[in-house]
Image (spheres, rainbow, N blue to C red):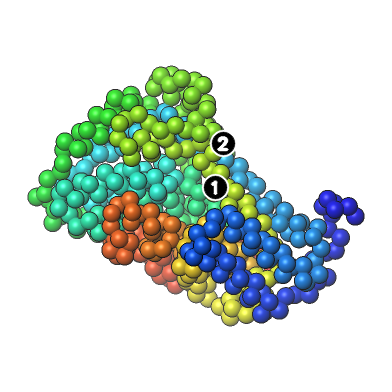
Amino acid sequence: MTHNDTTVEEPPNIHPLPSFWQALICFTGILLLIASGLFVFQISLHALIFLALIWAGLHTHSLGYSFAAIRSMMDEGIVRALPAIYIFLLIGMVIASFMQSGTIASLLYFGLDWLNPTLFLATGFVLCSLMSVATGTSWGTVGTIGVVLIGIGNAMGIPLPLVAGMIVSGATFGDKLSPISDTTNLAAISAGTNLYRHIGSMLYTTLPTFIIVLAIFLVWGLQYGDYHLPQAHLAEIRSALAHSYRMNGAITLLPLLVMLGMSMKRYSAETSMTCSILLAMLIAVAYQGRDTVNVINALWLNTPGHTGIANIDELLGRGGLYSMAWTLLLSIMALALGGILYRARFLQVLLMRLIAPISRASTLIAATIASGLAGNLVMGEAYISIILNCQLFRQPYREKQLDLAVLSRSIEEGSTLTTGLIPWTTAGVFYAATLGVPTLDYAAYALLNVLNPLVSIIMAMLGIGLLRTKHPVES
């Protein structure tokens, strides 16, 4: 066999299972490598995953696997996720085209007009939710409309931790549910479920939580009814947006409505995203008067807006294929790592000892959420927590005939929702720095992030939202 032959000489099942201690050392070594590399040495996460691949590969080779077999494991981990990788590529183009067409600018322009003192908290929560669903990014939402709202809340005299918690709650809502969110797609990829099936599963627990949180913010907001909005600041933002874009919502919001409508009609994500991209490009050229070449180039790398307001311009410059490179490359490398851990049966050995005793579906869901939180605490990053926990828990969900969309939902509730509540995660650091409020100060008021995992566990205990596979799944 030549050195570049991709044929696997030996079937994996002729090799011995790793011992429990070897599996534990392998998995713990990966966690320690990532945690120490990020927090102590500030090493790039991609470089750390490369080192983790070497570490896992050496452990696998010690079990007798050839290089060709190990490479086949990595290939299998990536190939399984190819359909969702295509969606990752489309996400960047959707965001860029929405910026060019004025779709996102229109959401911000009309949304600011909804604000009033009594409903400030509830309206701000809804605005942040809409913005994050439309853009697929909690960071972009916090860094734009979040900064605007924190300034308004400060001018009104509302406690800033409360305002920051409201902003983080709304921003995380879309980061969890948007079909163009990287974490939404990553969870679906890693769990091995359909994107829309994943989103539909999350609606079971997220919508009730959203309603509860909205009601709480409505009640809390009543005490601020006599406060005054900084109208001059709001007028300045709306004027800057109006000078940069034509603001006919019936036209500029069409790409978003088409994408959401086609999604509800169960068109494939690739089809609905492609149609919304083409429509947004048409609006950008024919209605907004953008240069055709610049609009097409924005699909690769968008350019900042020209409103004169720095954080708004930064938001309007988001998107493009290039903007997805960091997450996409990380996902491909982590999927390759997951392929080794799964096919060499390190994960199965750990499951037999640590998770196999779990008999109830509700306990399994609670353990999945807790593991996602633990992953964030240890690794400081939701992406790796999502991928590794999906690999770890997939088989127990299959054995209990739970739909893998329940796994992806639980992973998001443990990882995506909690990452912004931890001071040393990338999200926690960004939110605190951007909003000027320490993470632990606003964490108690980020009600969606706090309550959604609890609601999910309670619903699981009551047997609500436990989607089942139609046929028994072989172990």
Report the amino acid beneath label 2. Answer: Thr
Evaluate if marks 1 and 2 touch, with contact meaning CB atoms under 8 Å apart: no
Residue 463: mark: none
The N terminus - image quarter = bottom right
Residue furthest toward the right?
Answer: 1
Q: Residue at x 50, y 52 (%)?
A: 183
Please report the residue visible at 54 percent of the width from the left and 47 percent of the height from the top.
326
- Mark 1: few/some/many CA within 10 Å (<14, 14-19, 20+): few
**Which label's residue is closer to the chain start, 1 or 2?**
2
Is 347 displayed left or right of 207 in the figure? right
| Rendered position, 233 above or below 36 | above
Q: Which residue is mark 1?
A: 326
Residue 256, quarter of the rendered image: top left
Q: Amino acid at mark 1?
A: Trp
SS under mark 1: helix
How crowded pointer 2 is (Cα within 10 Å; few <14, some 14-19, many 20+) is rated as: some
Residue 245 appears at what percent x and percent y?
A: 34, 26
Question: Relative to the observer, which residue lies in front, 227 or 425?
Answer: 425
Q: Quarter of the image holding residue 270? A: top right
Q: Which residue is mark 2?
A: 271
